[in-house]
Amino acid sequence: MIHRRQILVVLTAIAAWIAAVNLPVSNPLTSDVELYKVVGRNMAAGQMPYRDFFLEYPPGAAFFFWSARLVPSGYATAVGILLCAALVVSAVAVMSAADGLGFGRGRQLAAGLVVALSPLLLGRFVIAERFDLVLCVCVALMVACAVRRRFGWAWSMLGLAVLVKLVPVLIAPLLFMWQRRTRPRTLARDLGMGAAVVAAGFIPFVVLAPRGVWRMLHYHLVRPLQIESLGAAYMRGITSLGGHPMAATYSYGSHNLVGTGASVVSAITTIVQVVAIIAVVVTVVRLRNAGPRVYVSAIAATLAVIVATAKVLSPQFMLWVLPASVLVAGRYGRHATVLCAAALVATQFEFPFRYMDLVAGDGAAIALIVVRNLLLIMLVAACWPRRDQTEMLNDRMSDASPSGVASITAP
């Protein structure tokens, strides 16, 4: 059964998508859709990613690029149709998770509407011309299934997310802890389902093109400090105060800072990221009565940490934090939703409208990206799991739902 609230959110998502992709822009940039099209065309011609041509993305992304060719329309339109569908499913899954977490109707609607309106909050270049909404829908479905205690489906969704972007593997420990507390008897089986999804996507390429797969992984390990990242914004902000902001160079498909200082800052932010992710896990362990609300908040905090401290912070990465951030409970839950929406808007102001100014070292553009990254840090704090979330209705979900993914739209 679908509520009228969900119908409203679906219609809002479609309307926001149509409005966003038709808005005029003052500073058009090269679309990634052309890259996707080339990859899809190469695969349709019988070429294998990683073996016959380099691809920086994991196998799940390659499958998406190829599958867009199956939609009976122009390639760019097909990508837009698939991403719009991902947006709609993400919004409905978020509302279902909010219902399962015991949120009131107003809070459920607010969470769904923030996701539905993300095309207007974040902008067309990020929403319609980057494929990260695929990761967004995987995370939203994973959370919705876990809240409904359908952990087999949750692990499968996490496996798909890893195939799309690799990074979600870092939230696997939280999902493991969640199921071990809630449904330990099926943990091995359900974890195996997620592992099977990842193996099915990677093993054929590892066997047939091991060097190409390693090159893809190595590409991300050695990428320099990108100018929109927290570390780069800090460095350029400090140097711009003296009137000489650090110059950016183009490599690895982005504008970056290079040199010893940038390498040191990149290493520091990576250490901070690892420590913060461990701290989230430790916090959950210390909350003895942790229930679904605590684990959802922990997932939101972890994803926010990953984005905020990454050495590459492309605008589309903001979609990674969206589905879980709007589901944070407790005193700061609404703050998390507002901060997430504000960070999306700030990102759109920076990209694409002020991006070239940022590359050139303009002080106002640097200040804008510093503010956006400050919002992300505040989002981490708002999402952090807390004791007040354990005192709420965390475990009201029963095992009565008869189906898996289909149950996410149940009232």
Image (spheres, rainbow, N blue to C red):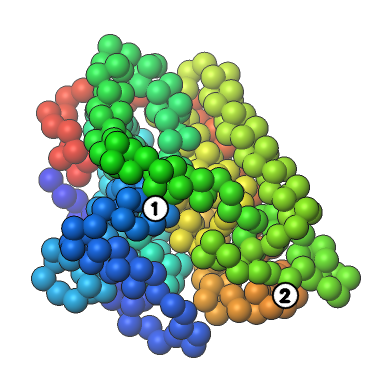
Which tag, 2 or 1, sits closer to the chain's start? Answer: 1
Q: Give me the C-alpha separation between circle 2 and circle 1.
A: 29 Å
Against 260, residue 23 (above or below) is below
Question: With 312 as the anchor, is 60 left or right in this view?
Answer: left
Of the pair 42 and 175, the residue shown nearer to us: 42
Against 217, residue 27 (above or below) is below
Which image quadrant for residue 254?
A: bottom right
Which residue is found at the position 54% from the left and 33% from the top?
385
Question: x and y percent of residue 371 in the render?
Answer: 67, 63
Q: Amino acid at mark 2?
A: Gly
Question: x and y percent of residue 40 in the render?
Answer: 24, 63
Q: Are marks 2 and 1 in contact (CB under 8 Å)?
A: no
Can you say which quadrant of the picture contains the N terminus? Answer: top left
Q: Amino acid at mark 1?
A: Tyr
Q: Which residue is mark 1?
A: 57
Helix, strand or loop at mark 1: loop
Which residue is found at the position 83% from the left and 66% from the top?
239
Taking the image as drawn, is residue 312 in sight? yes
Against 156, residue 124 (above or below) is below
Between label 2 and label 1, give the one nearer the viewer: 1
Which residue is found at the position 38% from the left and 64% from the top?
130
Of the pair 334 and 67, the residue shown nearer to us: 67
**Farthest top residue?**
185
Can you say which quadrant of the picture contains the C terminus? Answer: top left
Of the pair 376 and 58, the residue shown nearer to us: 58
Question: x and y percent of residue 401 in the render?
Answer: 16, 29
**Farthest right residue?**
242
- In the picture, the disc for residue 361 is 2
Question: x and y percent of residue 315 in the render?
Answer: 51, 63
Which residue is found at the position 49% from the left and 25% from the top?
390
Question: With 45 as the anchor, is 324 left or right in this view?
Answer: right
Helix, strand or loop at mark 2: loop
